[in-house]
């Protein structure tokens, strides 16, 4: 079975890379700050709790294509990038994946 | 205090946004084109690979495909471009509250007040370039100078993803050695005329006798002389950063004052044409036509008029602007600056109430004519098609119509703010 992996800033990762739209549970703080709390790769899939957010800043994703607010997060001890793509067509969350398969081993 | 002005130009803007969203097209020729609404397919922007293979902005889709087999053509995604335009402005807005955009992909930015704190103009330009690349995945070329004309020159000088400084020490070597048609407003006929007197470079214009230029080219001769010497003083307009494009306007400062309705008509038609072209390139129509007139006492008036149907037709814009002018300007003083602006923009595809008294067929015809003129100009240079009216005037027509090169510098100062709101 192919194991998908949500990618962190590794160098020389092989192409192609895939854009996986994921389910995210987020909290809006009283000041409007949006804080992602967990993600699921499929609607009924496993819940990956976001342990920590290092930073959030706008960033282009050259691997998956597009740009959004990029959250550098820690999930189960691993670092990952989670993008909030505020597109006029749909505002949604994505991760960069090495495989087009919604699976991860955080 | 000497000003520090940046001009930032997003390279192949529409195509770059599409490339960002389609990493699978990496390394392939891509163009944004087609216009479903008018069933009129032309190339709006191409990436550099496609350009190198002969794909030209403004050419028909079939022509482009012939020149470049395998060309990937994607339809324009106007909302997405607006979004990226807004992000660009947000970035520029970090460095200045004076950001003046013209269309979606270009903006001037007066960073004079930031230079002490944030570094030199060049350092700020570099930071902007890097930031845009990292955060938006686009490239910009940035020109840095003390006036808008040379800043604009700088952003065209080296691209993509580059910074060019044109300062008091370097402008003679950077700008003056370039052929004169790299300067705004120098068209083919002007070029030909000056060439016959042995003038070929921008430096030749800068070092010519201004009276000679005036005799030869009328008031435009004086304007060119001033621009070539870095003497343009047009300010960068203040606009709200939250509103990237609420209007598209174009204007100019005249080094020598206009004194008759005919001179004004000429300027208004020329400005309206470039505004209409820019509206179409950005897929906008607008229903508010505004003029800003500044007299030689430096006081200005802004007048606006809501027309019945949103338009991107140069004739309609020019006629509304001229009517506004005639109704509101009484020639107490000669005119120093003029701006034509179209606001209350909506996407071209937005439905609107048809005017019962205006033939839609007639409008569509005019629109097609505009597009045809635009295309011919794109292919053969601006003088290939001249409206009858313009044929008599001095050559104040912009040099090249298409994307990065046209724009008489924007002149709006406070006038434009009426539009934001
Ligand atoms: Mg551009």
Image (cartoon, rainbow, N blue to C red):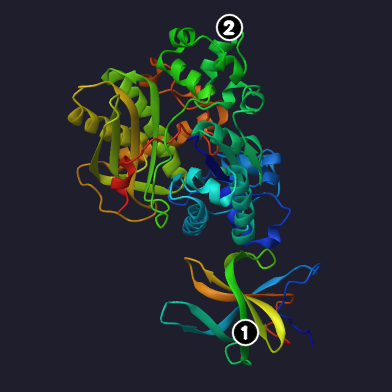
The residue sitting at 20% across, 22% down in the picture is B332
Q: Nearer the viewer, mark 1 or mark 2?
A: 1
Q: Which residue is mark 1?
A: A52
Q: Is mark 2 within 8 Å of ligand 1?
A: no
Q: Is residue B175 visible?
A: yes
Compared across the picture, whether B240 is left or right of B182 comes to left
Compared across the picture, whether B94 is left or right of B351 comes to right
Compared across the picture, whether B331 is left or right of B82 comes to left
Mark 1, residues whose alpha carbon is within 10 Å: few (<14), some, or many (≥20)?
some
Q: Is residue A102 above or below residue B311?
A: below
The residue sitting at 54% across, 42% down in the picture is B6
From the top left corner, tell me how far across and down residue B137 is, in percent: 63, 58
Compared across the picture, whether B377 is left or right of B360 comes to right
Image-quarter location of ligand 1: top right
Q: Is residue B335 above or below residue B375?
A: above
Q: Is residue A10 above or below residue B119?
A: below
Front residue of this view, candidates A70 and B92: B92
Q: Which residue is mark 2?
A: B197
Secondary structure under tag 2 reads: loop
Secondary structure under tag 1 reads: strand
Front residue of this view, candidates B223 and B96: B96
Can you tell which quarter of the image residue B9 is in?
A: top right
Q: Is residue B173 above or below residue A100?
A: above
């Amino acid at each position: 079975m192919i194991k998908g992996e949500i990618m962190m800033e590794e160098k020389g990762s092989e192409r192609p890379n895939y854009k996986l739209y994921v389910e995210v549970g987020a909290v809006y703080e009283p000041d409007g700050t949006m804080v992602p709390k967990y993600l699921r790769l499929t609607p009924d899939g496993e819940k990956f709790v976001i342990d920590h957010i290092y930073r959030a800043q706008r960033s282009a994703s050259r691997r998956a294509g597009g740009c959004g607010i990029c959250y550098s997060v820690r999930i189960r001890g691993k670092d990952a990038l989670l993008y909030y793509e505020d597109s006029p067509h749909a505002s949604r969350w994505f991760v960069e994946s090495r495989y087009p398969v919604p699976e991860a081993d955080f | 205090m000497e000003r520090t002005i940046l001009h930032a130009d997003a390279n192949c803007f529409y195509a770059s946004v599409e490339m960002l969203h389609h990493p699978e097209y990496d390394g392939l020729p891509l163009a944004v084109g087609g216009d479903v609404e008018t069933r009129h397919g032309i190339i709006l922007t191409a990436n550099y690979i496609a350009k190198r293979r002969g794909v030209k902005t403004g050419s028909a889709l079939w022509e482009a495909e012939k020149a470049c087999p395998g060309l990937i053509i994607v339809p324009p995604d106007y909302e997405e471009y607006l979004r990226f335009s807004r992000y660009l402005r947000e970035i520029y807005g970090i460095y200045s509250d004076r950001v003046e955009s013209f269309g979606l992909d270009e903006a001037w930015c007066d960073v004079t007040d930031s230079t002490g704190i944030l570094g030199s103009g060049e350092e700020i330009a570099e930071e902007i370039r890097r930031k845009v690349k990292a955060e938006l995945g686009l490239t910009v070329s940035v020109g840095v100078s003390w006036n808008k004309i040379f800043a604009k020159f700088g952003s065209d000088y080296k691209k993509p993803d580059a910074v060019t400084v044109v300062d008091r020490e370097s402008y003679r070597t950077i700008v003056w050695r370039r052929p004169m048609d790299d300067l705004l407003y120098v068209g083919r006929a002007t070029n030909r005329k000056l060439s016959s007197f042995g003038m070929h470079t921008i430096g030749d214009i800068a070092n010519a006798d201004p009276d000679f230029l005036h005799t030869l080219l009328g008031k435009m001769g004086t304007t060119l002389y001033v621009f070539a010497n870095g003497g343009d003083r047009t300010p960068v307009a203040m606009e709200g950063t939250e509103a990237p494009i609420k209007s598209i306007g174009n204007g100019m400062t005249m080094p020598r004052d206009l004194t008759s309705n005919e001179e004004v008509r000429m300027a208004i038609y020329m400005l309206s044409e470039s505004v209409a072209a820019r509206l179409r390139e950005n897929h906008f129509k607008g229903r508010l036509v505004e003029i800003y007139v500044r007299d030689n006492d430096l006081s200005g008036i802004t007048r606006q008029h809501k027309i019945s149907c949103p338009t991107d037709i140069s004739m309609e814009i020019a006629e509304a602007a001229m009517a506004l002018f005639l109704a509101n300007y009484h020639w107490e003083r000669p005119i120093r600056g003029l701006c034509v602006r179209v606001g209350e923009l909506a996407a071209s595809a937005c439905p609107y109430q048809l005017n019962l008294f205006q033939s839609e067929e007639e409008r569509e015809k005019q629109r097609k004519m505009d597009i045809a003129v635009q295309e011919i100009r794109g292919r053969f240079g601006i003088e290939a098609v001249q409206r009858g009216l313009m044929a008599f005037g001095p050559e104040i027509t912009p040099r090249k119509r298409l994307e990065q090169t046209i724009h008489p510098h924007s002149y709006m100062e406070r006038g434009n703010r009426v539009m934001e709101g």
